[in-house]
Amino acid sequence: MFTKDQRRLRDEAREFVRSVPRELILDMDADRVQYPRDFVRDAGRRNLLGLRFPLECGGRGLRWEDEVIAIEEVGVLGTSLACAYVMPSIVGEALNSFGTAEQKEKWLKPLLNGGKIAAEALTEPRGGSDFFATTTEARREGDHYVLLGQKRFIVGAAKSDFFLVYARTDPHGPPHRSISAFIVERGPGVEAEYLYGLLGTRGGGTGRLVLNNVRVPKENLVSTENGASNIFYRMMIPERMTSAAGAIGMGRAALEVATRYSDRRKAFGDKIRRFQAISFKVADSITTLDAARGLVYAAARSVDANDTPERSRRLVSEAKKFATDGAWQVINHSMQIMGGIGYTNVYPIERLMRDARLIMIWTGTNEVMDLIIQHEYYREILSLPAETRDTEADAQEAERTSEKVYE
Ligand SMILES: Cc1cc2nc3c(=O)[nH]c(=O)nc-3n(C[C@H](O)[C@H](O)[C@H](O)COP(=O)(O)OP(=O)(O)OC[C@H]3O[C@@H](n4cnc5c(N)ncnc54)[C@H](O)[C@@H]3O)c2cc1C
């Protein structure tokens, strides 16, 4: 289904993925590397970061439909490297959609050529799902804002050059109109105070970010004061699209290992793939991955086509939920297919499993995805235009309204 250009892009991404030394993956997983800076630099040098951003900012002027192809490929490396790869696409969205020309020049360009590393700081120790309850504050002092607060679980906290930070600028205003977004450079008062001992997704420098009266020039305000809710909603697209596309790559990597294994491993005198209990797990898994890919591409097309924000939001949330739940199931099946050896580090399934557990939690938990999906679907279905068929009437006794009791 790819165009010739998309096939070329996929092959280019595959070539980049093949070039990544296995030692990097292993060193990150063993916490011997704190952040894969050279990997990001290399992706930038190859012009593979933030593919959908305009050429003049350092992107390739492509679309989401193209970008998800590359992200799926990078996803086979696991969550940490995929996250480092997509972070310019996430933080870049705020700069590209809401930044000034100067901000694009100063922050977006070096982000896309791999010269600077950025992180996104939304979640706080107090909570992540309830974003609009943010307690980090920023108060204006002349030409500066002074930021005070803490952010938790920030990938890249250890090594990033700058952070996109959300902070409350109006302590008394309504939640949706009292938060602003800032570019905060690493410097005095900015500290990664604690690096977490993670189940997986290691080597990405995930830490607690402490902002201790950090002075940020007013030029680093992105968009308007108290105007960050638009940025937040916009950024949920790249956050969730990238999680979804990367998840497919991870599931694919595990399934390929397990499928090949099942064609070699024997039990009771036969290859284990001859047992339906094994081959049907393969069938289930590849069906799940293909369905997830279909949903991710549909979501990508919806965003590319400037579909209504409500429908794009629903599709993007469905894609994130389905692809991440699906990747987890596929990796679990893959481990079961491999028996005991799949549970060891002789094969990469256990690492992919540890990585994959996170993707159902971050960039909005899958429960939060359910909240959004049902909300948008109710809204759509309850305002369905009259020209659609009234299928409720297609029942023998449909006119028996005395039986249609709701309370
Ligand atoms: C390794 C790692 C890396 C991360 N990277 C980043 C990063 O770079 N930047 C960043 O800002 N954040 C990052 N996060 C944070 C992540 O996005 C949050 O952990 C996530 O959004 C959930 O927030 P929470 O942990 O505070 O859980 P809570 O919000 O406390 O939620 C706890 C549980 O309650 C459920 N819940 C909450 N509200 C509702 C509701 N209304 N309805 C139903 N269920 C609900 C949740 O689904 C969850 O199961 C990262 C997290 C980890 C672990």
Image (cartoon, grey):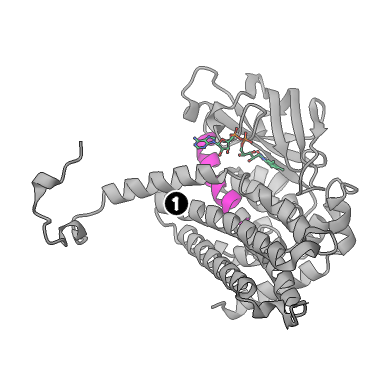
Vertical placement of residue 139 versus 183, above or below = above
Where residue 322 sits in the image (x, y, percent)? 53, 57
Residue bounds of the magenta highlight: 228-242
Residue at the spot 63% in from the left edge and 20% down from the top edge? 140
Q: Is residue 171 magenta?
A: no
Where residue 155 sits in the image (x, y, percent)? 74, 43
Quadrant housing residue 339: bottom right
Left or right: residue 108 versus residue 351 is left
- Pick the front one: 209 or 109: 209
> Would residue 343 be visible to someone looking at this image?
yes
Vertical placement of residue 96 versus 58, above or below = above
Left or right: residue 261 versus residue 173 is right
Left or right: residue 331 versus residue 364 is right
Residue beneath label 1, please?
314
Chief secondary structure of the magenta portion: helix
- Pick the front one: 101 or 195: 195
Q: Residue lying farthest front? A: 268
> Does the beta carbon at disc 1 come under 8 Å from ligand 1?
no
